[in-house]
Each structure stands twice: as C-alpha cells, then as structure tokens.
Amino acid sequence: MENTILPELYCPFPAKLNKHAESLHQHTIEWVRQFNLIEDEATYQRFCRSRLSDLAARVYPEAEWTELKLLSDWNVWFFILDDKLDEGNIGKQPEQLAILNAGLINILKEVGTANQISGLGEALEDIRQRITEQKAEPFLMNQFIRHVEQCLSASVWEATNRSKGIVPDVATYREMRALTSAVTTIFNFILIVLKIELLPEVINHADVQHLAVIANNIICCVNDIFSLEKEMRSGDVHNIVLALQQEHQCTLKEAIQYSIELHNQEIETFIKLETQLLSQRTEVDYQLRRYVSSLRFWISGSLDWHRLSDRYCFKKTVISQSN
C-alpha cells in the first residue's frame, strides 16, 4: 500500500464542534475505566489516542452536557463492541455471538441483568437506566430496541461470513451494512435524547425514512473507506471497497475510487431528497427541520472525525495496488 492522496469526498454541509469536546474526552476515559471495557494497556492507549468522544462532539455540536454524555457513551459502547467482533475470536463464532447478543437485548428490555456479560453488559445497563430517565415515548423505545436487535442479528451474519471467508456481493453488503453500522439505532437515539418530537406518522413517512437510509449509506461509506487498511490487517471482509473490488474484478485503487463516487452520488441524492421533503410540505414542522439538521451534522461531523482521528491509518490516503 503506497502512493497516498486525500480522498475526494464531497460534503457541502457545515461542520461544528461542541463546546464540551475536551470535557467529553475526559468523561469517556472515566466511563470506559468504570466498566473495564478495555482490559489491556496497549488497546487502552490506542483508544485514548482515537478520541472516540470527538465523534459525538462533532455530530452533536449543539447538544447540552448531559445529553452529549449519553449520546457519546452509546457511540463508544458500539465502537468497543465492534472492535471485539472485528478483532476477537467471538467475531468468527456466530453461535457464541448469538448467545451474547441475546443477553445484551435482554438488558435493554429489562428482562435480564449484566451479571454474565461483564463490562459490556454493565455499561449497557448504565445506558439503559439513563435512557429510562429520558421518559421516551413507548413507540420510540420500541423502535430503538428493534433496531438494536436488527443490528446485533446482522453482526451474526458478519461472524458467519468471517468464519467461512465469504466476501458478500455489493447489494447484499450494502443492505446488511445499514444494519451492522448501528446508525439506525443512533437515529432513534437522537429523537429520544435530544427530545425531537416527531409523531409516528412523520417518523415513518416514506420520504423521512428514505432520507435516513441515504444518510446511513453515506456514513457507512465514509467509515469503510477510512477503516479499509485496519480491516484488511485484521482479515475482515466486510468493507464496501472489498465488495466493489470483487464485483468489478478491479484493483484496490479503482475500488476505492468507485467507493468515493458512490459516496458523492449519495450526497447529491440526500440534498435532492431533503429539498423535496421540506418544500412539499406547506407547513414544515420545526421538529422535522431539527431532525434533518441532525442528519446533516452526522454526515459532516462523521467525515471530519474520520479525517482527524488516529483510529485509522488511512486518514490522508487513497491506497493504490498494482494489478
């Protein structure tokens, strides 16, 4: 891997940084230590350098302190779970992973405890208790838990692929990636924690759902491009670049360019759909505008964080590979 240049990822949305960014970094370190989510020193040092909390500070630039901590902790919890699946043995053991996932879901549904799941379960129990304090509408909590279930079920699909060395086709990968990313759970979480008051018929409106799907696709594409080198080192097959390389039978550099083009096309689609959604309604609800704005901040903030974080080696690069 050589010949590095900055990925030409188009994003016209403004980016901001939350005023609590530095305090959030300290909170995150303390929260991870509290539940012993990272056990060895080398991984802990990498975690500190990656500044996962800065992602929340960028995608929730206007959130208040208490809201920001909860939103960030949910992101961090999923990142740590994802690392355990990508880099640990359980990520290649679908049967064992399904058992772990069932225990985690039981914690969210308040029908199980964290006793058998160690730090991950205890941290999730902490998050669930803090969600309860938000007094969310039952339909929002039900949607949130359903999307967490879908995300964890999709992780078993990934584990099966890892165990068998299967690289999925592009269409299948993109469909499942929208679930494994946990972005669907995050968009639910935004409504609950930031108190964006949308009626079920608005949340479930086809255009609102489609806009969220496009935003999800954009965020996943960015993550896949920047995490490519990390995932190739660990032997993970789940990446849009690798799926495109297999489908097009092309070089890695060409597949990366396809991924960039796909990302930029999705941005254009998001802009068109957003304009259509907000213009076709004679009285656009303020809360709907807040929700659309939150999707924009996730798109711009996620891209900025990936470019700046030390979590990924592929920060300023398009990787080239000979045929």
Image (cartoon, rainbow, N blue to C red):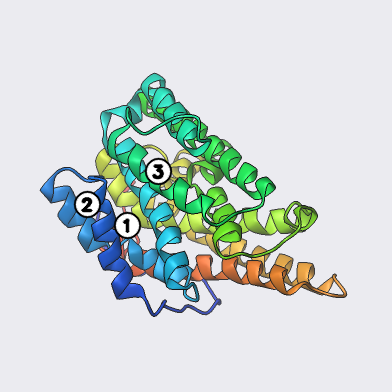
Q: Secondary structure at mark 2?
A: helix
Residue 57 in the image: state x and y as whole percent.
40, 70
Q: Secondary structure at mark 3?
A: helix
Q: Residue at x 46, y 53 (%)?
A: 130
- Earlier residue among tags 1 and 3: 3
- Earlier residue among tags 3 and 2: 2
Checking the image for residue 152, the label placed there is: none
Residue 157 in the image: state x and y as whole percent.
48, 29
- Label 3 crowd (10 A; few <14 / some 14-19 / many >=20): many
Q: Residue at x 32, y 30 (%)?
A: 115
Residue 234 in the image: state x and y as whole percent.
26, 40
Residues at marks 1 and 3, CA–CA distance in whole angstroms: 37 Å
Q: Is residue 182 above or below residue 261?
A: above
Q: Foreground residue, 33 or 226?
A: 33
| Residue that protrudes farthest toward the right in the picture | 282
Circle 1 is placed at which residue position?
A: 319
Q: Is residue 273 left or right of residue 323?
A: right
Q: Residue at x 52, y 55 (%)?
A: 133
Circle 2 is placed at which residue position?
A: 33
Q: Foreground residue, 101 or 270?
A: 101
| Residue that protrudes farthest toward the top in the picture | 95
Instruction: Inspect the image, locate mark 2, and give the three-letter code of the amino acid beneath it.
Output: Arg
Circle 3 is placed at which residue position?
A: 124
Residues at marks 1 and 2, CA–CA distance in whole angstroms: 35 Å
Q: Is residue 28 above or below residue 237?
A: below
Q: Residue at x 69, y 63 (%)?
A: 197
